[in-house]
Image (tube, rainbow, N blue to C red):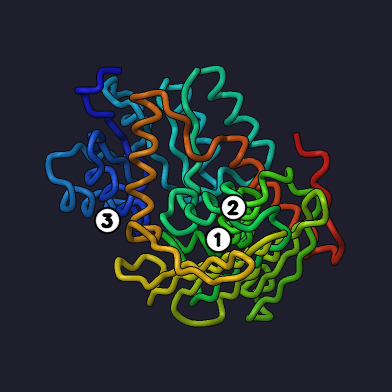
Amino acid sequence: MSAARPVRYGLIGFGAWGSHHARAITECPGAELVAIAARSEASQEAARVAHPGIEVLGDFRQLLKRPDIDVVDVVLPTDLHHEVGLAVLAAGKHLLLEKPMALCEAHCDDLIRAAEHAERLLCVGHEFRLSSLWGKVKDMVDAGAIGEPQYALIELWRRPYRQGSGGWRYDVNRVGSWILEEPIHFFDLARWYFSSVGNPARVAARAKARDAARPELLDNFSAFVDFPGGGYAVISQTLSAFEHHQVVKLTGSTGALWATWSGAMDRTFHPTYGLKHFDGETIHEVPIEKPTGEVYELVEQIDSMTRAVRDGAPVHCTGKDGKWSVAMCLRAAEAVASGSNAGLGDLA
């Protein structure tokens, strides 16, 4: 592809989060938003107001017929990822797919095979990997700042989820499991941070619903993820609190890292954050070069996908990575239901 021509995006989904994706595409140098597909008339009108001059469609299949679209960014409820993602790839477009990749591992496999058959890129939207904060933690781990990673605590304290368009996020048949909704980010981070020791082997988990009449809504959730060599990660989340506060603590054979992020809500443009490094003797404040938060990481994600299409750079999160994250969450859900550990050794 010519470096002079922008990478052209179609966007499927224009709800609360889809509108942020549209913003990110328009803010990214080298990317161009050329069409939006939205299901409801209200979303279509909102898209027209926010992005005048850009074609807005009610049927995503019409968007896929446009020959000038290079990448399709899919921001839909999870139960639609499989169907729409396959249609995107069958149309010969590169696919940027919001997390979670799909509701089950078999659907992840379908998407991976379809991308390989079409010779198109498949990228899963784990934008935390592009964070100037959480990504800095990864860089320092890989540089040996803590030695071999041995323990991680990834914790989120937040207010309840938004229900989503039509209440889909509160419908277990559409969301699959609340563990797939946000803890999936933290399972992905844990596997990413421990990549030097190998893939996770087992998951144990416990959860408690705040509302006894809605036991499928796992407002309080904690998991233990075992890695080769005895290292492990603790992933913990509550939706029964207030504001939005995330912590990552990592210890290794020679040092430790402590990263924090806080905001009035998850999509704030004005968070507070910081990173400390203990080298075994001294505590250092680590500078974070750019603002961090998912509203910022979305622009980084579009930039990363644009470079992958235009320049052949690797995508930041592959279909295989996306499948691993789904699998860890589903095995955690099994562990919650059974009260025992769930193995990951059979994951291809």
Pointer 2: residues within 10 angstroms few (<14), some, or many (20+)? many
**Viewer-proximal residue among 95 and 307:** 307
Query: Where's residue 28, x and y in %?
Result: 25, 42
Instruction: Look at the image and tell me whether residue 173 can be seen.
Output: no
**Viewer-proximal residue among 107 and 295:** 295
Instruction: Say which of marks 3 and 1 sits in front.
Output: 1
Pointer 1: residues within 10 angstroms few (<14), some, or many (20+)? some
Which mark sits nearer the N-terminus, 2 or 1? Answer: 2
Query: Where's residue 234, x and y in %?
Result: 70, 66
The type of residue carrying mark 1 is: Glu
Under circle 3, the secondary element is: helix
* Quarter where residue 111 is shown: top right
Cα distance, mark 2 to mark 1?
23 Å
Q: Quadrant of the N terminus?
A: top left
Query: Where's residue 201, x and y in %?
Result: 80, 48
Residue at the spot 44% in from the left edge and 78% down from the top edge:
243
Residue at the spot 52% in from the left edge and 41% down from the top edge:
81
The type of residue carrying mark 2 is: Val
Residue hosting label 2: 141
Instruction: Look at the image and tell me whether residue 247 can be seen.
Output: yes
Which mark sits nearer the N-terminus, 2 or 3? Answer: 3
Residue hosting label 3: 42
Cα distance, mark 3 to mark 1?
26 Å
The type of residue carrying mark 3 is: Ala
Residue at the spot 47% in from the left edge and 67% down from the top edge:
275
Residue hosting label 1: 182
Relative to 276, residue 102 above or below:
above
Q: Quadrant of the C terminus?
A: top right
